[in-house]
Image (spheres, helix red, strand yellow):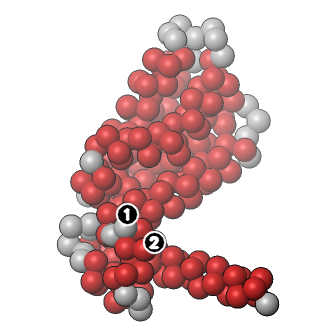
Amino acid sequence: MAEQVKTRRERYVASTRAALLEAGRRFFADRGFTDVSAEELVRAAGLTRGALYHHFAGKQGLFEAVFEDLEAEAAERITTAMAAEDDPWTRTSAGIRAFLEICSDPAYREIVLLQGPIALGWQRWRELDQRYLGTILTDGLAALLGDTGPHPLALTTAAFYGALTELALTVADAQDPTQARDQALHLIGGMFAGLR
């Protein structure tokens, strides 16, 4: 009997959390972090402010959780795209293409790239982005260059991380994100060709 009650409670907790995350993703993508109130979020989720504060400690915590969900989804898409390729150069190109495609996805674009630095602050934004995507880049470059590259791997990774971050922000802010993505892909391809 106690096991059934616990399971029911766990399901309730999971559904409450999911409802808040769904409302957060929708509202933050449509209107941005600063223009959405905690009251609107809980009303859209059909919950109380207490539920928001219990699960996420407020609007900021909910935003961070939505942000992390989007970053985890992006990491999975990039990893899947890379896994389909055998050659390290082709694998890296597939990962970069997947990343730049993700940058033109409206929810990712708005929440992660445009609102993330505002809502989380630059340091926290960068820390979370590195957590989800930094390892993929480091591993990809290590597979390409090993220990024999012309520069230390950490320095090369930092340079490409910075370039990809700026390209992602440029794609996100472009009038035509698809065109900007294609141009960024061409540019980063040239940078990788130079490295090769």
- Give coordinates of residue 172: x percent, y percent: 33, 53
Q: Do the residues labelled 1 and 2 touch (CB within 8 Å)?
A: yes
Q: Tag 1: residue type?
A: Gly
The image shows residue 191, relative to residue 84, as above or below, that is above
Residue 178 appearing in the image: no
Image quadrant holding the N terminus, namely bottom right
Q: In the shown orientation, is residue 44 left or right of residue 13? A: left
Q: Distance between the residues labelled 1 and 2?
A: 8 Å
Tell me the residue that label 2 is attached to: 55
Residue 21 appearing in the image: yes
The image shows residue 60, relative to residue 19, as above or below, that is above
Q: What's the residue at 35%, 45% (across, down)?
A: 124
- Give coordinates of residue 7: x percent, y percent: 71, 82
Q: Residues within 10 Å of mark 1 (few under 14, many from 20)?
A: some
Quarter location, residue 63: bottom left
Quarter location, residue 44: bottom left
Q: In the shown orientation, is residue 93 left or right of residue 19? A: right
Q: Tag 2: residue type?
A: His
Badge 1 or badge 2: first in the primary sequence: 2
Q: What's the residue at 37%, 81% (across, down)?
A: 50
Tell me the residue that label 1 is attached to: 61
Q: In the shown orientation, is residue 9 left or right of residue 174? A: right
